[in-house]
Amino acid sequence: MFDSFVGTMLGTLPSMTVTVLATLAITLIFKTSYTTNFAQGVISAVGAYVTMELMYYNNIPIYVGLLIGIVVGTAIGVFIDVAIFRNGRNVNAIGKQIITMGMVSIIVGIVPMVFRTANRESVQLIPMINRELRLVLFNDVAIQYNTLLYLGITIVIVAVVFLMLYFSKWGLGVRSTASNEYVAGMLGVNTRVITAVSWAIAGAVGAVAATMYAGFVQMNSSLFLTTVQVNAFLAGILGGFATFYGPVLAAVIISAISGIVGFVCILVPSLSTWKEVIVYVILLLFVLWKPQGLFGPKAIKKV
């Protein structure tokens, strides 16, 4: 039974890595542009479609295609910030969210016109998808090489971004802008460059996450990342947007909870249809317990 539990938890790793990257991208934009980017999923999908299109129909290696997909995702992110958000800087938070919703409608309409979205099979980053690594400590537990690759890519990306956030001039600018954009501008921080770079990084990270996710789902629509995006928003709420690391850690927690509930559903098959409901109820209880997020500041009540 313990081997089964370990296998179930390892099975959540691919989706966990994708959720972590999506959460990181959404958090960067939230902290610098003060909005929840509802278009993050479809922007990321474009990068994945570019990668797959080059690989399927032009016989370009997936690693080269992924690099080009990252460039496209970066360009879309910068374009949205410079051409749209920069001109709507004085729009309130709800207005900015409506703008991102409008971007969803635009991209969803454009993608089928540019890419062949029908019946697109999933493609792993490592072509030999049946290769797996047996764990010595467990009898019947194995982990695919793709899962190890996803985990390695995610750790590297998260580490690089956080090192930049805390040990680079851009990171100082991001933290200043996140604290107070107006004051940061008065102190000489070029907030326009800061937000543009943040959107660029979010677009690049999103393209990587979408390409990874395309390894175990079908890309029949530019909305194929919707579930990941919803979980990323939940991670932001659960971890608290007050910090950069809180949402990322919450993304790991959500995946762990999903794995545990999945294992319980294996033991009690009648609960299988209720799996997602149970997961979201548990997350709701966490939010009710910690309204500011698990890693958010404590609410101080003044008398």
Image: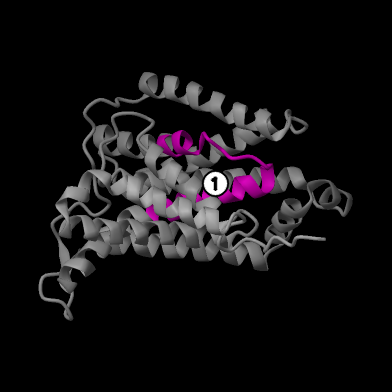
- Direction bottom: furthest residue: 137
Residue 191 in the figure: left or right of residue 120: right
Q: Which residue is mark 1?
A: 26
Residue 191 position, x and y percent, is 76, 46
* Type of amino acid at the residue the image marks with label 1: Ile
Q: Quadrant of residue 78?
A: top right
Q: Is residue 242 above or below residue 119?
A: below
The span shown in magenta is 17-45
**Magenta stretch holds residue 35:** yes
**Magenta stretch holds residue 11:** no
Quadrant of the rendering where the N terminus is positioned: bottom left
Return the residue nearer the eye: 114 or 89: 89
Q: Is residue 186 visible?
A: yes
- Direction left: furthest residue: 139
Residue 260 position, x and y percent, is 29, 62
Residue 166 in the figure: left or right of residue 139: right
Q: Is residue 106 above or below residue 201?
A: above
- Direction front: furthest residue: 303
> Circle 1 sits in a helix, a strand or a loop, which is it?
helix
Return the residue nearer the eye: 9 or 86: 9
Residue 241 position, x and y percent, is 61, 53
Return the residue nearer the eye: 139 or 163: 139
